[in-house]
Image (cartoon, rainbow, N blue to C red):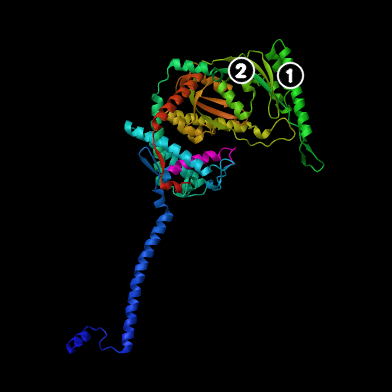
Amino acid sequence: MSASREKKQRQNDPDQGLTQKQRQERAEQQAAKRRGTLYAVLGVVIAVLVVILLVWNSGILQRGTTAASVGGRDYNVTDVAYYYYAAMNQESQNYLSSFNPQEDARTQYVDEAQTQSYYDKFLNEAMESMASVAALENAAAADGYTLTAEDRQAVEDNIASMKSAARQYGYDYSGFLKANYGRYMTPSAYKTCLERNALVNGYSMSIRAAQEVTDSELEAYYKENAASLDSYDYRTIYVDGTAPSATDADGNTVEPTEEERTAALQAAKAQADRFAALVEEAADKEAEFIKLAPDYVTESRKANYEEDPDYSLAEGINGGNLSSNAMYYGLTYATWLMEDGRKAGDVTVVESSSGYYVVLFLDRYLEEGNTANIRHILVKAELTQEDDASTEDVDESRIPSQEALDAAKTEIDSLLAQWEGGAKTAESFGALALEHSDDSGSASNGGLMENVYPGATFPAFNDWCMDPARQPGDTTVVENPQEGQQGWHLIYFDSWQPPLWKVTADTALRNDKMTDWMDGLVEGLETTHGDGAQYVG
């Protein structure tokens, strides 16, 4: 190497003139610097991964993923979850179902062959709901339908109700939504679901109201469904065939044996047959039925039949109610009553699970009387008395004292005065009912009872509502003497409505028309699962 070149290399050497120790220290410093740069890069990568993990755990990425595409509309995880959990909750309320909501739906099966999990069942039902929702959203958009003020208020009321329920069960609102609709549901997503639901419901109801139902269609429907639309008058008693239990020397209850159960049922059958035969032989069958009834019912019911000749009378019961009662309460005589050719004076004995009904047919007819829409407020008298063991046939704990009845009357009179001192409208009455009524079945709806038909309520209530002179805005106070309902009603008459059979027929026909309309909307819509479906449930 030339001298000049060597000199230049020495000048470019950063370690020129350094001792061996200094050179080593310098090398270590450079290595540390390189490691620091590497750690900085790794730190940035780790920080990014942490952010991604936090975002993933928060559910932001999952909930925004498309879970279903229907009719040109994409629905994310929370959209589908809203309907998935609705299907799951409905299944949970089915007492015949094997589904356990506390366990994973993916590991539970609808059938013994395990061909379909409950998860698949609920997801399929959610997708079916999404198809209807998408079809209605598209149709509403085409018609220019938007949320009404009532729709928006319904959404806010629902949110307020959920927040109240959350507090009641010890949750915060966000946590309560997750408990009910899955881990990805949020307050904003829930509101979106409610608004969508309100939109499609409001739109479909507007279409339903616009459907035309003609008188000829009503008449044709009646001819095809007369048995379920007609009303029935009949008398019935129940002969109990339950074998009594016993008490052993130690005071323990001893259940009856199978032989004792069979003997008790046979004795009840013989007693029911004897009662029916005596009624059948009488010249005035109804009078004989009334006279003999107290001697053939249980001792606890005996006084009811003795004190009230009409205690065994069922009057104005329509076939729809008969069918419902037969299904839910085991009143198997409904089929017998509704048979064609049934005539006044026919008597039968019908077996039930633990005894026998004896039924006397009186009449079948089409009730043409108008129904009524009313609002009411029930103030029950408080039950404060203890049962007196010395009066075996009376349970004083179910009978309010006169003081309690008077207190209930004072409260109902106060509510009437409050209403009369205000706007005196159906809406102001409904607000009072919402706050004060003890009738849980109607209070949440402002005390509204629609299409109340003749005979549907106890006599004093019925007689006032069905008075032909009744006008919208009329009010009154009536006492309710029925056990468990003792107290007072404040009643507001809203409007007259068509006869019950026409209301029933009109509802059924409109339902049929809406089904056909919906089928047309949904037909041909393509429905596909998205990647987000895996996060539902």
Q: Residue 480: percent from the left, percent from the top?
A: 58, 27
Residue 502 in magenta stretch: no
Mark 1 is surrounded, within 10 Å at the Cα level, by few (under 14), some (14 to 19) or many (20 or more) other residues, namely many
Q: Residue 182: percent from the left, percent from the top?
A: 47, 47
- Could you tell me which secondary element the residue under label 1 belongs to? helix
The kind of residue tagged 2 is Glu
The residue beneath circle 2 is: 339
Is mark 1 in CB contact (under 8 Å) with mark 2?
A: no
The kind of residue tagged 1 is Phe
Q: Residue 294: percent from the left, percent from the top?
A: 72, 21
User: Is residue 301 at least partly visible in the picture?
Assistant: yes
| Residue nearer the viewer, 493 or 508 | 508
Please state if 21 lies on the left or on the right of 386 as rendered. left
Q: Residue 354: percent from the left, percent from the top?
A: 70, 29
Range drawn in magenta: 80-98
Mark 2 is surrounded, within 10 Å at the Cα level, by few (under 14), some (14 to 19) or many (20 or more) other residues, namely few
The residue beneath circle 1 is: 275
Q: CA distance from mark 1 to mark 2?
A: 22 Å
| Residue nearer the viewer, 434 or 410 | 434
In the rendered image, the residue lying farthest to the right is 249
